[in-house]
Image (tube, rainbow, N blue to C red):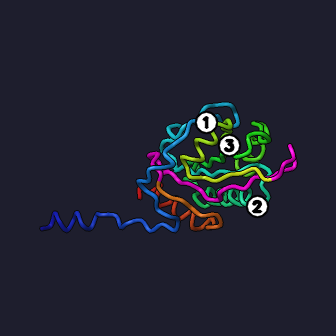
Amino acid sequence: MAVLLAAACSKKPPANFASTDITGAGYAQGFSLADHNGQRRTLQDFKGKAVAIFFGFTQCPDVCPTTLAEMSEVKTLLGADGERLQVLLVTVDPERDKPQVLKAYTEAFDPAFLALRPTEDELKGLASDFKVYFKKVGDSKTAYTMDHSAGTYIFDPQGRIRLYSRYGSGAKDLFTDIRQLLDGA
């Protein structure tokens, strides 16, 4: 009886996520893409870290800079554990988002943030796998914008998809969710 009580007392309470829990989803299972430094990256490269990945582009007027600013704040809120968070931006505009542009853009928010630059074919496949929408709007070669999904996928330190955070959730909710993942939820 004492063993049963001790086991019950040591059991962690269930996680209480603000984001949508998609643990076990059959989509958003990973990637293999070149980063802004030309290095091929996969989820395995970030084992031991929570990974936050979202789709966007450098000329985005609102969603992308807001998301990167929130993730920068989350990293600050995590304190010493901020190094255990990897933020990844996957460009939906590889035509204009050249590696040096992506590097300058992401590093302006945090030097450790990385941008991933898929080829057009890789982007189509990845967008399908992550259930992400994107579309070029406008017919000019340079004066166009990109419509795109505006959420963030969050993987736990073991590389499993766990959460989907809607755009505008705020740094405090993201921090709480990522803190729980880093603590083993």
Sequence-first disc among 3 and 2? 2
Whether residue 147 is in magenta: the answer is: yes
**Amino acid tagged 1:** Leu
- Closer-to-camera residue (60/180): 60
Rendered residue at 43%/56% (across/down): 23
Whether residue 169 is in magenta: the answer is: no
| The C terminus sits in image quarter | bottom left
Q: Quadrant of residue 7?
A: bottom left
* Residue 115 badge: 3
Sequence-first disc among 1 and 2? 1
Q: Nearer the viewer, mark 3 or mark 1?
A: 1
Q: Where residue 48 appears, x then y in whole percent?
A: 48, 44
**Amino acid tagged 2:** Asp
Q: Where residue 89 appears, x then y in whole percent?
A: 66, 47
Rendered residue at 65%/59% (across/down): 150
- Dot 1, crowdedness within 10 Å: few (<14), some or many (≥20)? many
Query: Magenta residues?
Result: 138-161
Q: Where residue 123 appears, x then y in whole percent?
A: 64, 41
- Closer-to-camera residue (117/10): 117
Q: Which residue is mark 1?
A: 33
Q: Which residue is mark 2?
A: 62
- Calculate the distance from the C-alpha at mark 3 to the C-alpha at mark 2: 17 Å
Tally of numbered discs: 3
Left or right of 11, for residue 146: right
Q: Quadrant of residue 3?
A: bottom left
Sequence-first disc among 3 and 1? 1
